Amino acid sequence: MAASLADEADQASVWPGLGRRSAGPLRLILVPDEARYQQLTGGRAPSWGAGLAVPGAHTILIRADAGDLAVTLRHELAHLVLHDAIRVRVPRWFDEGYAAYAAGEWDRIAALSLNLSVARGGVPDFEALNGALRGGIGGAAPAYALSMSAVARLAERNPTRSLGPLLDRLAAGVEFPDAVRATTGFNLGQFERDWEGTIRRRYGLISWLAAGGLWAVIATLVIALGGVRRRADRPRRAALDEGWTLPPEDETGPELDRTP
């Protein structure tokens, strides 16, 4: 398994906005489970994580028991490729969003359709998104999807419909907020509001209901009404049990043949 992943990591690939390139020499560590993963990361990595990239050390750590290994590898390679290509610091949401975008993790975006918090308008700002990416799995899962959607929106807002112009500026040393303004026409605050509005339009309550949320509501109501009915029937069932006695065991008839 490790040899197969190493062969894959050694191949040049096309990366969104960066073209065809290789991650270069790197150390790839494959561990069997969460316990070993936590041991090697000193307990600093989230327990739900499937992989970890350390761009400064050109090292990738992957759990063999979590997620799709090929997708996890490409996600972590994207971190290395991105950090090798650009010369400035970028927000965590962009770093993680780009990795998910480059790895083609479209199931994350699809999952937003069924996220009730997002459907109710609970879209975090970029600062809150950065924090959610470091939190528990319940908040991190939608945070990764939202980060990926923000990166996709950066591409949509450029006339080329790609990340190329933005990444070219980051590679030239232009600071992230200035690169966003130059390639989208928005300052970072304006882009944040544009993205939040886009998410609310695409994943509002109507979309949530259409994607299956209505059935979730119906199922919840059926379960709740079933519980109410059972509680209401308890006295009647108890009354039906009164007056019944079981015969002794030797009067219940011949024992059944239990041989296979």
Image (cartoon, rainbow, N blue to C red):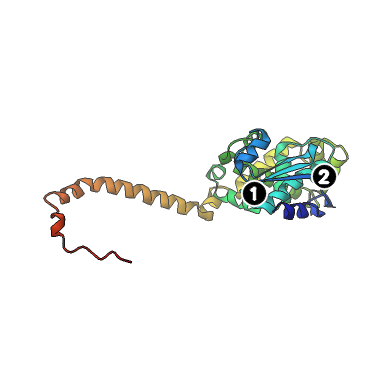
For badge 2, the amino acid type reads Leu
Residue farthest to the front? 259
Residue farthest to the right? 172
Spatial CA distance of label 2 from label 1 is 32 Å
Residue occupying the point 71% across, 48% down: 75
Which residue is identified by label 1?
A: 64
Asked whether the residues under the numbered discs 2 and 1 touch, taking CB atoms below 8 Å apart as contact, a structural biologist would say no
- Measuring from the top left, give residue 248's x and y in whole percent: 13, 54
The residue tagged with tag 1: helix, strand or loop? loop
The residue tagged with tag 2: helix, strand or loop? helix
For badge 1, the amino acid type reads Ala
Residue 108 seen in the current view:
yes
Q: Quadrant of the C terminus?
A: bottom left
- How crowded pointer 2 is (Cα within 10 Å; few <14, some 14-19, many 20+) is rated as many
Residue occupying the point 16% across, 50% down: 241
- Measuring from the top left, give residue 153's x and y in whole percent: 71, 47
Residue occupying the point 76% across, 49% down: 155
Examine the image and state in which quarter residue 191 appears. Answer: top right
Q: Quadrant of the N terminus?
A: bottom right
Which residue is identified by label 2?
A: 167
2 or 1: tag closer to the N-terminus: 1
- Measuring from the top left, give residue 169's x and y in whole percent: 85, 42
Eyeballing the image, is 181 above or below 221? above
Q: Is residue 119 left or right of residue 21?
A: left
Judged by depth in the image, the label closer to the viewer, 2 or 1, is: 1
Residue occupying the point 36% across, 47% down: 224
Query: Looking at the rendered structure, which numbered label has been put on residue 76?
Result: none
